[in-house]
Amino acid sequence: MINDEIDQDVLKELEKISEYEVDIKNYEIGKYIGQGGFGQVFHCTEIKSGKMFVMKISKESLIFMKKNIKNLIREIATMGLVDHPTIVKFIGYSPNIIPPEELQTHPYRSHNNHPIIILEILERDLHKAIYNNEELSPTFQLKTIVGMAVAMMYLHSNNILHRDFKPSNVLLDSNGCVKVCDFGFSKLVEDDNIMNSITISQAPIYTPSFAPPELKNNKYGIKSDMFSFAITCWCLLTQKKPYAFGGFVCFKVWHENLRPNEKLIENENLRDLIVQCWDDDPNKRPDFETFVQIILRKEFWPAGVNEHEIFEYLNEIGMKSDGHPKVPFVKVISKDHDEFDSIDKIDIIEEIDVELDEPTASIGLYQKAIEFYWKKDFKKAFTKFKESAKKGNTSAKYYMGIMYIYGEGVEKNIVEGEKLIKYAADMGNNLALKTYLEILKAKEIVPKEENEIIDYYMTSAERGNSNAMKTLYFIYADRYDVEKIVPFLKHLSATGFNPASLWLAKYYQRLCDMNNDQNAFNTSLTFYKIACDQDNGEACLYLGKAFYTPYKGFTVNLLTAMNYLKMASNFGNAEAKYYLGKILYSHVSASNNEENSLWKYMHALNYFEESYKLGYSEAAFEYAAMYFNGEGCLKSIGMATKIYRNASENGDSHFSEIIAEKFLFGEDAPQDYNEAKIHFWKAAQKGLKEEKQPDIKKSEPNHGLKICQRIVQHFEDMDDLHEATKYHQFIYKHWNDQKSKNYVFSHPKFVKFETNDEYYQFFDECIDKNVPNAIDCYVSFMKTKDKFPKERKTPQEKLELYRSWITRGFHDPVYKYLWELQKEYCNSISLTKQEREICRGKGFT
C-alpha cells in the first residue's frame, strides 16, 4: 500500500503526535509473544543499543482508521505524557508508513500502514506469579497491592480509565515491583461524564471474571476499575482463580451478585475493605486515593509484613507513609493540548465554589485570582487572592496557604502556608479542613496530634461532610463502643451507606448483650433490617441465621429465616446458600408427599452445590452425602468421593480429618481405608502448618499435635503398626513428644527417613538403648537394595561396624552377620583367626 491510499485527514492528525515518533528501522522484530486488544505483540531489539523492548502492532490499518484516528492520537499522546514509577514506560510509536521504494526491503513491509507502539519490556506478569505455585510473601502481596493502587490513583487523577484491570495487565520488574500496563488504549473521560463515556469500540473491554456489574446497564466509570482491582487483589491474596467455572461468569456477577469467597482473605479488616471495593453499587466503592490511605494502616496488612520494606517501596514510588504523594500528581492532560478536546483540567477550586457561601464582595476578586492562577501568572493571582481574603473569602485564604507552601507568586513559607490553611479550616472551609488533615498526618504524629486529627474529622463531620463521616467509620469500623460517631453513622445510614447501618446494628446489639436492654435489641433489629433493605448481604445473613438457630432475643421462624437467607443468597453469599439447603433438607421428613420431598431434596442439593462452589467448605459434607445416598439426585459414589477429595484439598485440617474418618468408617462415604489414609496425612500436615501461623484464629496451642494424636489413635486401634509408627515419628520430629519417641524406638522396623545417615543415626540410638531387634533392623536395612544405593556402606565399613558392636558386647546376632559378610565378600574382606573360630563354634559354616 502507498501513502495515497491513506486519508489526508488521518495524515494530518498524525502530525499532532510526531514528537513521539520513532524510526521503526532502528528496531529488529523478535519472537512473537501473543495477541492483545490492540493487536499482535512481539519482542523487539533496538539495533544500536541492543536493548530489548515490547512491540505492539495494531490490527487496524491507517487506511481504514478515519473514524478512530482521534482516539488513537489521544491515547498515544496520553501514554507519552504519563510518567510514574508504577506504570510501564512508553518508548515511542511509529505510523509504519513505508515509502513505495522501500516496500520490497523494509523489515516491517508485511505490517505496512499498521501503527506500532514500543514499550519497556518486563518478562513477568502478576498472573504468572500468582498461579505458578510459588508462595508469595505477605510483604510482596502488600507491596503489589499498594503499587497497583498508586498506579490507578495516578491514572484516575488524569481522567484515564483502565477498563481491563487484571493480573495479566500488571507486570513485575526484576525486583518484583509493579508496573501497570495496557492503560493507554483505555479511555479518557471528562470529570463530569465518568459514567457515560464511550470506548473506541463503543463497548467496555473488561475481561469477564473482572467485569463490574454496572456493565449490565452499559454504564461504567472511575469506580468500575476499583471493582476489577478488588478481584485482582483477591487473586493475589488467595492465589486462587476467582470463580470455579468458566462460562456465564458475567451473568452470575451481574444478576446473581456472585463474588469470590472473601473468607479466604485471612485479615478481617482487609477482607472487609476488599468486599466494599467490589460492592454492587459503584457509589459505595472507595476511590483509589481513599484506598491507598486505608491500606497503609497496619491493621489492614497481612500478617508477617516487613514494615521497613514497605516504607522503602513507598519512598521509591514517591509516596508518603500516609498514602499521599510526596509531590502532588501533576495533571498531564490539560487544555494546553488542544488535541484532547474532551478533556478538561481538574479545577481544584470547584469544590469550594460549590460548598461555601462566600461574601459577595469577595467573589469577583476570587474569580479573577483563579483566572490568573490557571494562566500561571502567580504574582497577580496571589495579589487578588489576598484582596479577596481581606474581604472574608476563606477559599482565597486557603489558596494563599497553598501558594505559600509551593512558593507560587510569593516566597516559599511552609509555616505561614499551614497557618493560613488552618485558619480557613477553622472558619468552616471543608477543602481547607481536608488539606490540613493531610498536613497533620504527613508529620511525625504524637498522641496529642492523633487526637487533633480525629477532632478535625469530627468537626468536619459535624458540618455535614459525608467524606469525614465515612473516614470516622473506617477509623472505628471494628469497634462497636464509640458512642460519639453514632449520630454521623445514622446520617450515613439514612443516605444509604449500608456499612454504617450494619455498624449501628452491631453497636446496639452490643448494648443489648451488655445490659439485657430490650430497647437496644429493638433498635439493633431495626438497623439490621435497614441494612438488609440497603442490600447488605452480611446483615441479611445475620437475620437469616438468627431466625433459624435462634440467637438471643429471636424466636425461630423458618419462613422469615428463609426470606433473609434468600436475600443474602442473591448477593452471592455462600454461607446463606448453605443454610437454605439445611432448612430444606431437614424438613423433608416432615412432608408425607413424595413429590414434595423430592422437590426439597433437589433444591437443597442445588443450594449445597452453589455454596460449595462459592467456597463455603462446610457445604461439602451435605453435598457429597446427598450424592452418596442418592437424595435429590442419582446415587453416585464417584461424585461423592470427588467432592470429598476437593474439600480435603482446599479446606483446613479440620475438614481433612473429618473426611478421612468418613472414609474410615463408611459414614456417608464408601468405606475405603487407603482413601482415609490419604486424608489423614493431609490433616496432619495442615495441622502443623496452621499451628505455626498464630494469626489463624482456630490455631489453639498444640493444634497440630492434637490432630496427629487423634489420628494415631485410629491406627493403633486397628493394629496398623506401619501407619501408627509413621505418625508417632511425625509427632516426635515436630513436637519432641516423649510418648511418641518411645513408640518409635520400640518399632524400629517401621520407621522411614529421607537419607541413609538418618537411618544409621536412628539405629545407633536404638542399639544404645538396647531396643530389641535393633541390630537385626539395622542389618536388614543395609541389605535393602532400593535404599539410597549411592549412600550404602561398603563391605569394609560394614565389617568395622560389626566389630564395634561386638566390642560393645552385642555378640549373639552380630557373629552371624559377620560370617555372612565374609562369605559374600571373601575376596575383599577377611576375618581374624579368633573371629573365624567363634563363628565355627556357633555352628556357622
Image (cartoon, rainbow, N blue to C red):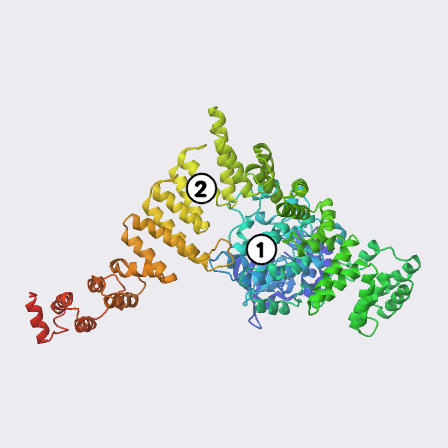
Contact flag, marks 1 and 2 (Cβ < 8 Å): no
User: Which numbered mark, 1 or 2, is in the foreground of this view?
Assistant: 2
Task: Using the rendered view, name the quadrant where residue 82 is placed.
Answer: bottom right
Residue 360 horizontal side relative to residue 693, left or right: right
Where is residue 73 shown, x and y percent of the image?
Answer: 70, 58
Is 54 or 467 nearer to us in this picture? Answer: 467
Residue 529 in the image: state x and y as whole percent: 66, 40
Left-right relation of 354 to 145: right
How far is disc 1 from disc 2 in space, using C-alphas?
29 Å
Say which quadrant the N terminus sits in.
Answer: bottom right
Q: Is residue 95 in sight in this rendering?
A: no
Vertically, is 644 above or below 230? above
10 Å crowding of disc 1: few (<14), some (14-19), many (20+): many
Closest to the observer, 662 or 451: 451
The image's mark for residue 621 is 2
Against 64, is 662 above or below? above
- Residue found at the very far top of the displayed protein: 593
Give the structural element (helix, strand or loop) at label 2.
helix
Outermost residue on the right side: it is: 361
**Element under label 1?**
helix
Determine which residue is flagged by label 1. 233
- Where, by quadrant of the figure, is residue 111 drawn? bottom right
Q: Is residue 288 left or right of residue 819?
A: right
Q: What crowding class fits label 2: few (fewer than 14 Cα within 10 Å), some (14-19), or many (20 or more)?
A: many
Residue 466 image point, x, y percent: 75, 52
